[in-house]
Amino acid sequence: MPLESGASQSPGDATIGGAFVAESRATLAGAHRKIEHCLAQLADTDLWWRQHESHNSIQNVILHLCGNLRQWILHGVGGEPDARDRPGEFSDRTNRPRAELAAMLRDTVEACDRVLSALPAAGLLERRRIQGFDTTLLTAIFETVSHFVGHQHQIVYITRLRLGNVYRFQWTPAGAEQGAPGANGS
């Protein structure tokens, strides 16, 4: 099970590097939960919808996220073979069912979490060549998690476009401190 926000990398790793890896894992897990929340609200046909032919469907975004995670985390950090077909992530027009896409994303995120959970914080400054870029593992993880979160927002936006007013938010503010409507007397 992926870590919750604020969880430590390992029992004895109270380093900045350990905290970075723990927060990266928690952020990836949280963004994945938001994507799952969207998928649960959509019909299969919504996953294939694109506003314009040149735009990506949610399905293409999920294929892209899986390819990116496999290349940057599983390959770049974890040392697995690099077998990415980036152009295919965007050109694929196979109408996959929601369950298949959800399982594909879940399996990829879980595999990345295993790689990150085994990464010693001291290894974060190791240099690797990933997708033609010379980088550190710290940068690879930071950029990959940020990339995942960015596309999570895209999936939320497309979901809201498809569902309109029936979209169910995953989280709503409770109380004035969180910004709930009318909680501060307004």
Image (cartoon, helix red, strand yellow):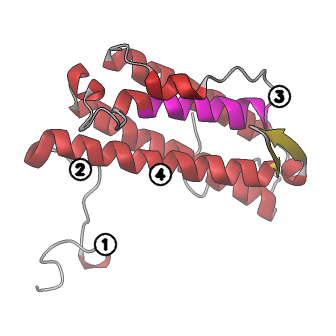
Q: How many labels does the image show?
A: 4
Q: Nearer the viewer, mark 1 or mark 3?
A: 3
The answer, for residue 4, to whether it is visible in the render is no
Mark 4 touches mark 2? (CB < 8 Å)? no
Name the amino acid, label 1. Answer: Gln
Magenta stretch?
Answer: 61-79
Q: Residues within 10 Å of mark 1 (few under 14, many from 20)?
A: few
Name the amino acid, label 2. Answer: Phe
Name the amino acid, label 4. Answer: Gly
Q: Mark 2 points at which residue?
A: 169
Quadrant (top left, top right, bottom left, bottom right) of the N terminus: top right
Of residues 46 and 93, the one nearer the viewer is 93
Left or right of 78: which side holds 143?
left
In this rendering, the answer to whether 93 lies above or below 23 is above
In this rendering, the answer to whether 111 lies above or below 56 is above
Residue drawn where x is 10% and y is 43% of the image: 166
Of residues 122 and 51, the one nearer the viewer is 51
Name the amino acid, label 3. Answer: Gly
Give the mark nearer the N terminus: 1 vs 3.
3
Q: Which of marks 4 and 2 is in front?
A: 4
Regarding mark 2 in the picture, which secondary structure is present there? loop
Q: Where is residue 32 drawn, in percent x and y?
A: 46, 39
Q: Nearer the viewer, mark 2 or mark 1?
A: 2
- The numbered dot on residue 79 is 3
